[in-house]
Image (tube, grey):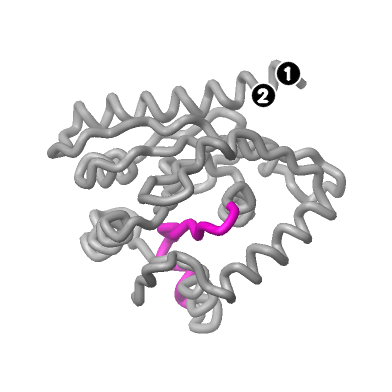
Amino acid sequence: MNLKKTSWNAFAATVRFLLKIIFVNIYRIDVQGQENIPEKGSIIVAPNHKSYFDPPLVSIAFKKRLVHYMAKAELFKNPFFAKILRICGAFPVKRGRVDQGAIRTAVKLLKDGHILGIFPEGTRIRKEELGKFHSGVASIAMLTGTSILPIAVVGSMTMPKRGKKLAILVGKPVQVNKEKPDSEKIKILNEKVKSEIEKLIKDYNDKQ
């Protein structure tokens, strides 16, 4: 994978712009907390996951910064689709085991000052509650000392309905010290990030 210093390219910008036009014209999108997104430097984006549309939806909250998503390897089986994904900054991860290649790519992205996107639940959770958080986000954050940006996506589980209201809620970064991860530290950090996302969702729903 060719990692560019600019973390942005014309094709990815065009795709993001077109998707934003499509989503904004079909749905009512409420983006909150954009001031919590750093203008430069590395950070790990950690959203909840309800729909295949979550990656482009979350990207709407970012202006001229590209989120490099860690995506399941199965999505890269089609050569054409794989090329599109790679141009847009995504890279594959083999699920069900520790993928050292994907971890190395993630670490390099962060060291080079890019934004890494990982869904902590590992897959789409088709219910209102958040699913179990896997170790990936917390482990990589601790290995690199990178802050985690909790993001809540509300309403994407039943997206097809035109005019539906969707919300992308960006929380405040969770600071992470660089240290060797272990199961207890991972559990504590996961619980902290998960509680931040749950709070974003609850606070938003309470105001509706």
Q: What secondary structure is found at the residue carrying circle 2?
A: helix
Few, some or many residues within 10 Å of mark 1 (<14, 14–19, 20+): few
Instruction: Name the spot of residue 194 as percent of width and height, x first.
Output: 43, 28
Quarter of the image holding residue 63? bottom right
Residue 162 included in the magenta stretch of the image: no
Q: Amino acid at mark 2?
A: Tyr
Instruction: Name the spot of residue 112 as percent of width and height, x first.
Output: 30, 60
Q: Which residue is mark 1?
A: 207
Q: Is residue 130 left or right of residue 100?
A: right
Residue situated in front as seen by the camera: 5 or 124: 5
Q: What secondary structure is found at the residue carrying circle 1?
A: helix
Residue 70 included in the magenta stretch of the image: yes
Q: Residue at x 23, y 40 (%)?
A: 142
Q: Residue at x 35, y 61 (%)?
A: 93
**CB-based contact (under 8 Å), mark 2 and mark 1:** yes
Q: Which residue is mark 2?
A: 204
Position of residue 29 relative to residue 128, above or below, is below
Instruction: Name the spot of residue 97 as percent of width and height, x first.
Output: 26, 55
Q: Residue at x 70, y 62 (%)?
A: 19
Q: Residue at x 59, y 39 (%)?
A: 34
Position of residue 175 relative to residue 105, above or below, is above
Quarter of the image holding residue 182? top left
- Segment tinted magenta in the rendering: 63-77
Q: Is residue 17 left or right of residue 201?
A: right
Q: Amino acid at mark 1?
A: Lys
